[in-house]
Amino acid sequence: MTTWTKATGDFDFLNGDFDVRHRQLIAGEWIEYDGTTTAKTYFDGAISIDEMRFPTKGTYGLSVRLFDPTTSEWSIWWVNSTTMELYPPVRGQWSADGSRCRMVGEDAVDGRPILCSYEWSDLTVQTAHWEQAYSYDGGATWETNWTMDFTRRTTPAPPLDVPKVTGEFDFLVGRWHMANRRRRPALGEPHEWYEVESEMQVTTYFDGAISFDEGWFPTEGFRGATLRLFNPATKTWSIHWINSLRGQLETPVVGSFGDDGLGIFEGPDVWEGRPIDVRFTWTPGADKSAWQQDFSEDGGKTWVTNWLMAHTRI
């Protein structure tokens, strides 16, 4: 059995509910408005997710923060409920004393390449400060365009009163026992099947349009998480796997649920240096559900099943 060692608590200060005072530079003018956020960590602190609510706009925002245990670096992705796309990540580390961090990444504004920075500072038990800045000259100069001041709430933040976009993965919300059968190796011969017991806790954000799960595989030496994003324009889901040993968003599979109720999601990937296609198949159920993973080396003409999960609700 694996005993998990806490890799980091860098973003533990953000856990809970906060009121947020926003100041945003729009068309040369500073605009102020209020919102809330609720944050939670997973992987014992190595994943941090917060859901922001903008009541005056009727929109959500989500930050997904992943800690890479090999580099001790954080990567942060932003999702806006109006587009449901992952913005390019910023990356960086906290200062040695843990009092502040600055993270930088490449992005574009109106087609113009920029550098974007996030910076956290002034941390207390009850408050925190965040800033975003852009650089149009490769980092020589920076302009701050968004600040947030966080104040901890004593009550849960109220939900947004907006129409629900989808509930397709709502069946998965809650805690599950998983009976796994895995193929070793995933491709190639000879092979063998072995069994693994695990558990999974699932929640949703954006009132169902984002689904997230954390899974425990104590005999495998890792934990797994899944981030699922619904695209309201195409009615498809993008599903990213996260392995606790790597701390990265893996290449997504993309797909949808059909009229038969099955969810089919496919995408390109690499396995042991070889290009492959990956397919996830979900069979939903209220108290029992099933998931299957297949690999293809011939562009989807033939598939090899290498992982089966039978879920039973706890």
Image: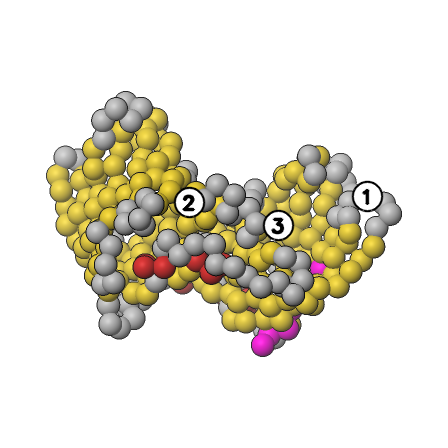
Task: Identify the amino acid type marked 2.
Answer: Trp
> What segment is highlighted magenta in the picture?
308-314
The numbered disc on residue 208 is none
> What residue is rendered at 45% in x and 44% in y?
72
Task: Identify the amino acid type marked 1.
Answer: Gly
Task: Identify the amino acid type marked 3.
Answer: Phe
Q: How far apart are marks 1 and 2 (CA)?
A: 35 Å
Asked whether 154 or 111 is in front, the reply is 154
Q: Mark 1 points at which residue?
A: 188
**Residue 272 makes an appearance in the image:** yes
Residue 28 point in image, percent of width and height: 14, 35
Magenta span: chief secondary structure: strand
Q: Is residue 180 left or right of residue 66?
A: right
Q: How is the image coloured?
A: secondary structure
Q: Distance between the residues labelled 2 and 3?
A: 28 Å
Residue at the extreme left of the image, as rendered: 29
First in sequence, mark 1 or 3: give its number. Answer: 1
Q: Is residue 309 magenta?
A: yes
